Amino acid sequence: MLSYLFRFAANRLSPAEASAHLTIFIYHRILSVPDSLQPEILDAEAFDKQLKLVKSLFQVLPLPQAVAALKAGRLPARSACLTFDDGYADNLLYALPILQQNAVSATFFIATDYLDGGRMFNDTVIEAVRRAPVGHYDLRELGLESLTLTTAQDRQSAIANLLFQIKYLPQSERSARVLALVERLTKQPLPNDLMLTTAQLLDLHRAGMTIGAHTASHPILATLTETEALADIARGKQQLEAILADEIQLFAYPNGKPQVDYTRRDVELVQSLGFLGAVSTAWGAAQAHDDPYQLPRFSPWSSQPLRMKAQMLRNLRHSVMNC
């Protein structure tokens, strides 16, 4: 009965065709088992449960098909899409089998510089904190707050605080700060298999999944000059097209907050490169009159099914924020 009521409400909030609302879900990693340092990331079992819940409420479509239908005012009622950002190897290892078992397609946005053994700065911080011996770390000479690492909660808090302090530094300064931090925290080697290899990316593409661009180096575009931003966006697109021998039509802004992580200038750069649409991380559901180069995305954060469905309905009612 409750499922019927939720579908009825979703039909009212997202009818078909001209008045339709498109919900786009965003994921990054799907782990084999839960990680105490990253409790917000779904493991395979939790993802399977969430995907079944999504399918019970929405009609899940491939993103290229949904974007074209949205523009044309022909979107089915209760339409939704699934997307994954960055290009983690676990997208192939754990997410893909679950998608296939549930007969669902997804779009994977790949930052190409991290293929074949790369590691993003946030993962470098996480893995260094994970491996750091118990103790107190005075990081003031690195321009960072000092840490005491004893419990898992200490490490969770340390990761959140470090990423907050480092994330918006200029790229070169951020890289130097992260390198110095790793040298201070641990002598253990950090993993080099977190991201997809080129062969794994090809496997994902051959499995019928859509591949989208996510820049090459995953910069905060708003901090770059126009020339730098254009070059990074174009390089990512060109590298993917060379690997896959296929046109890359969709783009995801790194980090993705409008007016913070990207600007109107960057939207125009994406359009100039021939993409058919792009996604942000502003929450809400897109409508036919919204900018197809700033489509919002949403992550339900509750693990309780009823609360999660309520969050999905609330997202359908939220107005889109754009540049």
Image (spheres, rainbow, N blue to C red):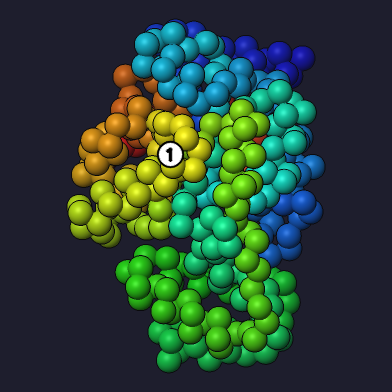
Judged from the image, the secondary structure of the residue bearing numbered disc 1 is helix
Q: Quadrant of the C terminus?
A: top left
Residue at image position (47%, 12%) is 75
Residue at left offset 63%, top offset 46%: 200
Q: Residue at x 68, y 74 (%)?
A: 130
Side of 237 relative to 187 (left or right): left
Going 72% across and 51% down the picture, which residue do you hit? 31
Q: Is residue 156 visible?
A: no
Up-down relation of residue 239 to residue 293 (above or below): below
Disc 1: CA contacts within 10 A as few (<14), some (14-19) or many (>=20): some
Q: Position of residue 249 (x, y in %)?
A: 40, 31
Measured as percent of width and height from the top left, residue 149 is found at: 66, 82
Residue 243 visible to the viewer: yes
Left or right: where 212 falls relative to 6 = left
Q: Position of residue 218 (x, y in %)?
A: 41, 55
Image quarter of residue 4: top right
Q: Which residue is mark 1?
A: 241
User: Which of 197 and 111 lies nearest the eye of the viewer?
Assistant: 197
The count of marks equals 1
Q: Nearer the viewer, residue 311 or 218?
A: 218
Which of the pair 273/175 is nearer the observer?
273
- Residue 219: which quarter of the image? bottom left
Q: What amino acid type is highlighted by mark number 1?
A: Glu
Quarter placement of the N terminus? top right
